[in-house]
Image (spheres, coloured by chain):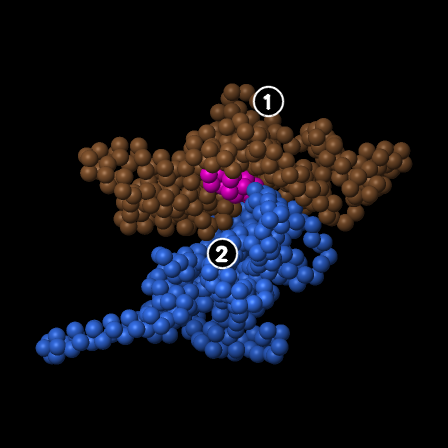
Chain colours: A blue, B brown
Amino acid sequence: MMSIFKKNKPEERTEEYGEYEESYYVASQWQLMWRKFRKHKLAMGSIFVLVLLYLGGIFCEFVAPYDLESRQIRYVYCPPQRIHFFDEKGFHLRPFVYGLKRKIDLVTLQKSYKEDKRKKYPLQFFVHGQKYKFWNLFEADLHLFGVERGGVIFLLGTDRMGRDMFSRIVYGARISLSIGLVGVFLSLIIGLILGGLSGYLGGVTDTIIQRIIEILRSFPTIPLWMALSAALPPHWPPLRVYFGITIVLSLIGWTGLARVVRGKLLALREEDFTMAAKVAGCKDMRIISRHLLPGFLSYIIVQMTLSIPSMILGETSLSFLGLGLRPPITSWGVLLKEAQNVRTVALHPWLMIPVLFVITAVLAFNFLGDGLRDAADPYH
Amino acid sequence: MLVYIARRILYMIPTLIIISVISFIIIQLPPGDYLTSYIAQLSETGESVDEAVIASLKKRYGLDQPMYIQYFMWINGVLHGDFGQSFEWNKPVSELIWERLALTMAVSLFSLIFTYVVAIPIGIYSATHQYSIGDYFFTFVGFLGLATPNFLLALVLMFLFYKYFGLSVGGLFSPEFVEAPWSWAKVIDMMNHMWIPVIVIGTAGTCGLIRVMRGCLLDELRKQYVVTARAKGVGERKLLFKYPVRVAVNPIISTIGWTLPSIVSGATITAIVLSLPTTGPLLLRSLMSQDMYLAGSFILLLATLTVIGTLISDILLAWLDPRIRYEKEAA
């Protein structure tokens, strides 16, 4: 056995190595980047986390055991339920939750909940539960997990109206995570146009746009965002408020992108291949789209990834202050508005859980951006 | 040097003009103008609306004039210290803002100092002990600080103090000093309350600075003059602090330009959670009640002070680093 290994290994390695070399030389720019990117463990992990979060957001009706507004009046401010694998009879492969007994303190009127060991509700997957309209298109009642009728499952507790926090967080993911993407997309459009003009035309246009960018960057963002979002009329329908907030957030977000675009355009404009294309009679648009754009696309993607977190944080802060999104739209910031004072935090700490999701998403985007930046940098 | 300062101040003028235009737009954004809200408020409380008062107010703010004349009247007032009237408080805006602005600047300044005092040593440590446990630890904590919203950190700190020390840490003064006139004792009392907001606001900026400091110092440490100095037997401590650290600190100082806006930003939201007597809570309140002259003045002054802060940092940097001074003068 050993001898076989010893004999095979070197040959295999040289072969592999040779293959690697050859594929290395014929690899396209994107393949090279992917190869480097895969080595960045943290960034790969972040992709996994982000995919999970986004899947949860996209299929929130299915993932959440309850819907956004369904209230369990008997379970107000219920702490997160524990999932058990062991009972008095020993280990169960299928986890279960106990039923809940409510006790009201007659002096403080505080409600407390105790597990009722006599009632057991095994956790079931793909159960039929509350009806919902999936993506507002067709009706369904299948949920990822749940418990039998009569039992309740509050993985992350309930809020002051007895609404399941886990379900609300999953629904909130759809809003909070999409606002980052939509906002970055808007910033990208503004950034590409203004940065492109600035870099390609140069001269006075360049100076003016650069000055504007500098001025916008010297503005303290939160006060400006607060003022702009407070100006959104209160009678607007929720969807319009959503886009209004996104536009407010991207009003400052585009500056970073515009800078990258301009810097790269200025550098690439002087390259020999641009001159060659010009001599060959290419039109401006063709030069930009065929020869220049691929050169800085990777940098734009990096910059976009790195500016998503600030959008998510901005939306969270604004909604937390009550200036951003408002119910019935539920984002993580809207959920956090419930945990605004020390009393709530002291009595019902689980209302702070949405913030863990905010931190996770922001960290994941930061790590992903770091990984992409390293991968996109040919000299790294 | 003087030429450089003069040029920088000249550059500031268009910035300030644009800031004032943005603030004016913010004042004008909500539907209706100051006067309609004022009249609505008066009739709500049942007071009779005096035609003569309205006419005089209309004239004072030029409300019957076109927009650009209104802007010039407003900016003229601002330059003479008249920021308009806060209809919610029924006082001139200028009576409400100055003390709060001064406190905001004090909190921001201390946060800035805190950020640098914490970030530079940690950055140096992380660079000299690259890939050690300490390096990973600080990197992790720094990223966490970056990802955690300020207001949450404020809430958690408040909660911990409340739980373990039974202290209420909101505000910037003890109850007996809130209404008291300024005195030495009040300043000391303020200092005792200052550190929680300072930590909360400071952590967000610290992470970025640690990364920059670490990166710059690592670049410097790889250079040949370090190897030469080491080969000649210069002591590690002297070697580190006399040359590479001094070079690496420069980019850090030049980042004040973007650290300051983010600190003022963070101070606003932290102050709301901690209910500090700074601009944040009043700004939020004025926005909520659409008390626009007050809100607009805050935005204008916060932005102006930030720009002035950046200017001072630029001048400091030029004074510190002759290369920048000469390059800019030559340009």
Q: In the figure, is residue A254 to the left or right of B249?
A: right
The mark tally for this picture is 2
Label the magenta part by its dominant secondary structure: helix
Residue B260 lies within the magenta run: yes
Res. A358 in view: no
The quadrant in which the N terminus of chain A is found is: bottom left
Residue at the image position 49 percent from the left and 43 percent from the top: B154
Give the residue at mark 1: B181
**Can you identify the residue that label 2 sits on?**
A270
Graded by Cα atoms within 10 Å as few (under 14), some (14 to 19) or many (20 or more), the crowding at tag 1 reads few
Residue A116, placed above or below residue A111: below
User: Which of the 4 quarters of the picture holds residue A116?
Assistant: bottom left
Q: Residue furthest left?
A: A3
Residue at 51 percent across and 75 percent down: it is: A143
Residue B147 picture location, percent across and down: 46, 51
- Of residues A140 and A74, the one nearer the viewer is A140
In the visual, does B13 lie left or right of A304?
Answer: right
Magenta range is B254-269
Q: Nearer the viewer, residue B330 or A158?
A: B330
Quadrant of res B225: top left
Q: Is residue B116 magenta?
A: no
Q: Residue furthest front?
A: A279
